[in-house]
Image: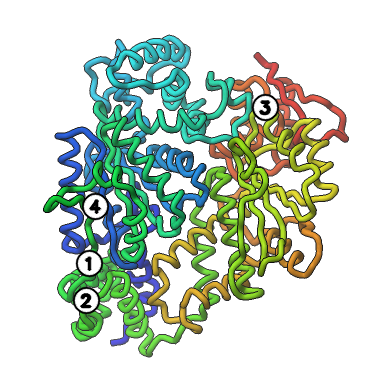
């Protein structure tokens, strides 16, 4: 009997890589775990964690293996087995050595925002909250309470009591032995429990440099986390593990890190954590062919701190993932065939064969080709499944269709305000874009060097890259997302007379308000180009970066496509896929290749939305009231950003303006100036109801 068409839509082998949802394991997603695959590697990681509990000093291990061998799956399994450990995950770090530590801090804090676990149980508070609750156990009213009890009690604390509790919290934390948190960090950690300040607190702790002076005032800090505080936060988080459990730091997809200075930055960070912190367990994940470069670059100081002495010689601690044998391959396929929706279809059709629509012969065909990677098995099973259901061999997929579908899927996976404002990473993603376009148009790569701002004495908190092709200069791209004080106006002054072909890029979530700023920006735009990237454009660039990372990890190696999915063919396809070719920066690049000036094009028309509809007027008005009552005053542009940050998404400038004009807010807000010709985004809003 030929399977019904419904079976085609329940193919359990379509997903062959582990995404963020599976790694974090906070919903109903099924990992389809086969414990025998990479069992010895997993046991080694668990053993390391047990040793960390008995000997509290930072430990490090390399996990290496061929593409598709299950590194991400191994980490997802580890996340599900945790009890009081804290899990953080960092992948695709920036290529700028000076930006690596801030990026790691950002990802650590973002990871701690995920919900805590105790084995199979997902708790109803985050890992970061668990950290702060552990510190609250030293505060009078919370002494001798368990963390779950503190969580329940905290929800009943009136906000009017926060000030008093904050002072006691600061005093108790600063009396803890070996912990040396600054006053600012201690204060903001406490604010992470305040529902009305939580978003700001987490942004600050993660090293964001795009907050405003008003935001810093609301948190009671003088400015963004500086470079020294980054080190202090990371070190002290490890020390706090004594009170609430160790931190696992996964450093994944480091295969693009090939410059000595970048590898040494990772080395110095890990040595700092070893020498000045305690409860860190660091896992560096690499493709097996990349490990020799790291091994040769890392110093003796690193090796003696993290290696193991065997036969009077220091060796790196590592676990090697291997290919899977026929027995494991069968277990993997059978596990996927237990997919609940597929089992339900079999039940409806009164089919008792647990392999259906496969027969034993199909399973034999998939698993009789010798040792291979889990990803190769799943791809073979996917094609076999489709052939069985359709009753004919599957035809090859057009490579351009595969590339477009995967890119769109990555982009659509971002939610809320994701991804975060990240100057160094967006500069890398722009380089990825220009690499793809240059290869697509001319073949070969594009040359990138540091620009004047990066080469000048002192530290430039941004990116400055000069691009050239075949030895001929093309253009210069400056990225800058800092809002504090005069940082942006000062930058505009520095590049006001930059050479032709200079392009300034800024995340659209970071404002450009202010009379002086607007004047300087207009002067720059008179002879140069300015791109204020929309969130959609930021997501497109990050989707491209994640796609290329997956390509390097071998995710597409076993796809049956026309032409074949070689990296060369994928690069050629990428340049013509709409998500890439329609970007405004792509239009600019092609203009430059044609010999014209890099003139910004209007934002492209958006495709039909797949996201939820805009919020109801009542919900938007209620959120505006909540924010303005708390903040007292904001500029219009900042209110729009804050509304989005706090979960009311898909709000346009016009929709927010309509909400502010509604009768429920009319008497509570003053809007200055009231000149109808004044730019809407620069207006000042003052809450006067109270």
Q: Nearer the viewer, mark 1 or mark 4?
A: 4
Q: Is residue 470 above or below residue 136?
A: below
Placement of the N terminus among the 4 image quadrants: bottom left
N-term-proximal mark, 1 vs 4: 4
- Label 2 packing within 10 angstroms: few (<14), some (14-19), many (20+): some
Residue wearing tag 3: 485
Q: Nearer the viewer, residue 429 or 243?
A: 429
> Label 3, label 2: how many angstroms apart (C-alpha)?
60 Å
Residue 267 drawn at (x, y percent): 36, 45
- Asked if the residue at tag 1 contacts the one at tag 2, i.e. Cβ–Cβ closer than 8 Å, the answer is yes
Q: Is residue 265 above or below residue 293?
A: above
SS for dot 1 = loop
> Label 1, label 3: how many angstroms apart (C-alpha)?
53 Å
Residue wearing tag 2: 371
> Label 4, label 2: how many angstroms apart (C-alpha)?
27 Å
Residue wearing tag 4: 316
Q: Which residue appears at 32% of the width and 19% of the height?
A: 136
- Asked if the residue at tag 2 contacts the one at tag 4, i.e. Cβ–Cβ closer than 8 Å, the answer is no
Which dot marks residue 322? 1
Residue 120, visible in the rendered structure? no
Q: Which of marks 4 and 3 is in front?
A: 4
- Label 1 packing within 10 angstroms: few (<14), some (14-19), many (20+): some
N-term-proximal mark, 1 vs 3: 1
Placement of the C terminus among the 4 image quadrants: top right
């Amino acid at each position: 009997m030929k399977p019904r068409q419904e079976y085609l839509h329940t193919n359990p082998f379509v997903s062959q890589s582990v995404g963020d949802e599976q790694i974090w394991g906070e919903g109903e997603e099924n990992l389809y775990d086969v414990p025998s695959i990479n069992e010895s590697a997993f046991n080694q990681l668990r053993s390391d964690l047990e040793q960390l509990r008995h000997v509290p000093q930072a430990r490090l291990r390399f996990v290496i293996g061929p593409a598709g061998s299950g590194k991400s799956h191994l980490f997802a399994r580890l996340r599900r087995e945790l009890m009081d450990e804290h899990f953080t995950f960092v992948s695709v770090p920036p290529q700028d050595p000076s930006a690596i530590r801030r990026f790691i801090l950002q990802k650590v804090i973002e990871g701690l925002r995920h919900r805590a676990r105790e084995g199979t149980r997902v708790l109803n508070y985050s890992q970061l909250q668990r950290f702060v609750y552990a510190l609250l156990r030293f505060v009078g009213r919370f002494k001798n309470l368990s963390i779950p009890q503190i969580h329940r009690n905290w929800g009943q604390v009136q906000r009017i009591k926060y000030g008093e509790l904050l002072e006691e919290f600061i005093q108790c934390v600063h009396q803890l032995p070996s912990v040396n948190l600054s006053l600012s960090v201690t204060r903001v950690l406490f604010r992470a429990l305040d529902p009305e300040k939580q978003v700001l607190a987490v942004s600050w702790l993660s090293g964001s440099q795009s907050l405003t002076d008003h935001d810093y005032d609301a948190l009671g800090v003088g400015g963004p986390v500086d470079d020294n505080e980054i080190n202090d936060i990371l070190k002290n988080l490890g020390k706090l593990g004594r009170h609430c459990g160790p931190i696992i730091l996964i450093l994944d997809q480091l295969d693009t890190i090939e410059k000595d200075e970048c590898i040494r930055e990772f080395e110095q960070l890990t040595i700092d954590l070893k020498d000045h912190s305690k409860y860190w367990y660091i896992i560096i994940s690499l493709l097996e062919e990349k490990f020799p470069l790291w091994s040769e670059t890392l110093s003796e100081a690193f090796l003696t701190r993290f290696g193991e002495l065997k036969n009077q010689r220091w060796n790196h601690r590592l676990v090697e993932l291997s290919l899977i044998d026929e027995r494991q391959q069968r277990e993997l396929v059978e596990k996927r065939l237990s997919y609940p929706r597929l089992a339900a279809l079999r039940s409806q059709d009164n089919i008792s064969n647990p392999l259906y629509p496969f027969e034993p012969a199909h399973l034999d065909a998939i698993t009789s080709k010798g040792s291979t990677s889990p990803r190769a098995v799943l791809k073979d099973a996917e094609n076999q499944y489709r052939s069985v259901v359709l009753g004919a061999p599957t035809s090859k997929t057009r490579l351009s269709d595969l590339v477009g579908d995967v890119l769109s899927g990555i982009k659509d996976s971002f939610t809320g305000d994701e991804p975060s404002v990240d100057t160094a990473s967006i500069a890398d993603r722009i380089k990825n874009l220009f690499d793809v376009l240059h290869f697509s148009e001319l073949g070969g790569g594009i040359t990138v060097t540091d620009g004047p701002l990066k080469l000048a004495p002192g530290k430039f908190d941004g990116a400055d890259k000069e691009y050239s092709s075949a030895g001929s200069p093309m253009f210069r791209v400056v990225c800058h997302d800092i809002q504090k004080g005069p940082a942006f106006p000062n930058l505009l002054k520095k590049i006001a007379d930059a050479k032709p072909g200079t392009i300034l890029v800024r995340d659209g979530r970071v404002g450009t308000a202010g009379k002086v700023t607007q004047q300087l920006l207009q002067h720059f735009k008179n002879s140069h180009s300015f791109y204020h990237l929309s969130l959609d454009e930021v997501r497109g660039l990050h989707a491209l970066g994640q796609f290329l990372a997956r390509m390097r990890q071998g995710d597409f190696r076993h796809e049956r496509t026309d032409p074949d999915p070689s990296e060369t063919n994928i690069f050629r396809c990428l340049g013509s896929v709409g998500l890439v070719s329609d970007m405004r920066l792509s239009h600019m690049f092609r203009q430059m290749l044609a010999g014209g000036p890099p003139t910004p094009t209007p934002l492209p028309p958006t495709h039909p939305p797949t996201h939820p509809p805009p919020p109801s007027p009542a919900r938007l008005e209620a959120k505006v009231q909540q924010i303005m009552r708390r903040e007292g005053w904001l500029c219009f542009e900042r209110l729009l950003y804050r509304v989005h940050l706090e979960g009311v998404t898909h709000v346009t400038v016009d929709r927010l303006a309509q909400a502010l004009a509604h009768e429920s807010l009319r008497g509570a807000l003053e809007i200055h100036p009231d000149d109808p010709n004044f730019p809407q985004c620069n207006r000042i809003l003052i809450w006067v109801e109270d």
